[in-house]
Image: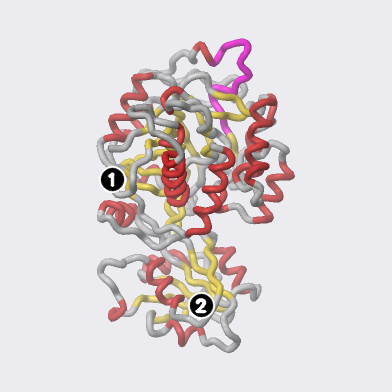
Amino acid sequence: MPELLPFAGLRPVPSVAGPLDDVVCPPYDVISDNQRQALVERSPYNVVRVELPDGDYTGAARLLDQWRAAGVLALEQGPVLYGYRMSYRAPDGRARHTLGVIGALVLEPPGHGILPHEHTTPKAKSDRLELIRATRCNTSPIWCLCSEPGLAQALGPVPDGGDASDGPETSAEPGAGPARAPDYARAPDYARAPDYARATDDDGTLHELWPIVSPGVHQAVAQVIAARPLLVADGHHRYETALAYQAEQRSNGAVPARALEGYDALLCFVVELAEEHLQVLAIHRVVSGLPQGTDVVSALAPAFELTPTDAQGGTLLARMADAKALAVITRESAYLASPRADRLDAGADLDSRRADAAVASLPAHQLTYEHDVPAALAAVSSGAADFAVLCRPAGIDQIARTAHGGERMPPKTTFFWPKLRTGMVLRALQGARNIQDL
């Protein structure tokens, strides 16, 4: 069964690094070239320089070492779990929160205590493997879902924020209210990160993180997480990369009989599998480079019944939901695309799978993925793309059924939103004889 263990994280020290808003970044796989450049220019300590090092993995490792030596990053002085909450406005305008816990997830082969739900691609895994080889660090957490109820309750009360420079007191037993911060965090010779940290991203999402030191809370969280297998929501590439790195390390020397090495676990954010804590968006397909004169509508007609619609209307996604249809957007027109009955597969009720099958039947082309509908439409209207297929998001129940059934969705099916900020806490592997002693 899954094990999520406390660990000593590496965290930015705002008095040295500056405001966390300028230091953290999105996960590597949603950062565009232009966004990376803007983040680099925002701060000399922005973690994008490590998370997405533009191929210079040795340079990323050297930079991490420099930041630790200069006090830009501080190592927690004892093993903790980290509470993490994101507060945001959903696409429908409602105020929402995603609350979970960050810890060190003990690695297991997929299909046992850890259940993936998507396939992966080789290129992303090779990049992440080079990064972990060089830095010996988990720079960003994967995201897992806990289907056993009670995780939010086990975490206890959420800090109220207060002054981020001083931080609120950390929580003790579940439901017991605030407790005193640990003595080690007040050591005068320890240049430390605040007990409570917050950052606001460019979309306006508030990210809050705080260390949880109470053994009682650690035990309560462990019991909930160990009750059922975890589902990998986001970070399939990083999980498979961690397994590959573990195998490499074990092949290089003897494995202790009982102790867990640093490479035997992975930085992980766990959230309860409940609608109130999750916002899942779709990932759309954008196609370019088709041979001149390709009739997209005729090419897609065998797979879909195409009904003209308005691409510019603000209700397009709602119309797709009502019609139980995808949408096909060309430079000249837009259509609701209902799968033809003779093409339906009872076990493949996913827009991503239907879109991929239809696009694969086209002549040679380039396929890119886009979670932002306006960006996908702009690519088509500007002439940068030939057409786009918009998908409806997979439901929470579909994700759970797929994972528990031992199947996987196509790559780039689910986009869990908002994204955690890379850099709020990192997990070093080097020098860790036992992950519980980090």
Residue 289 lies in magenta, yes or no?
no
Indicate the quadrant where residue 378 lies: bottom right
Q: Which amino acid does label 1 sit on?
A: His
Eye-nearest disc, 1 or 2: 1
Please tell me which residue is depicted at 60% across the width and 44% down the height of the picture: 51
On the image, the x and y values in percent for residue 369 come to 52, 64
Instruction: Check disc 2 and report the residue beneath it.
Output: 334
Give coordinates of residue 348: x percent, y percent: 31, 67
Mark 2 residue crowding within 10 angstroms, few (<14) / some (14–19) / many (20+): many
Q: Quadrant of the N terminus?
A: top left
Out of 306 and 142, give the one closest to the viewer. Answer: 142
- Residue highlighted by disc 1: 112
Q: In this view, does 221 lie to the left or right of 14?
A: left
Give the x, y percent position of residue 235: 45, 48
Q: Image quarter for residue 366?
A: bottom right
Q: What element carries label 2?
A: strand
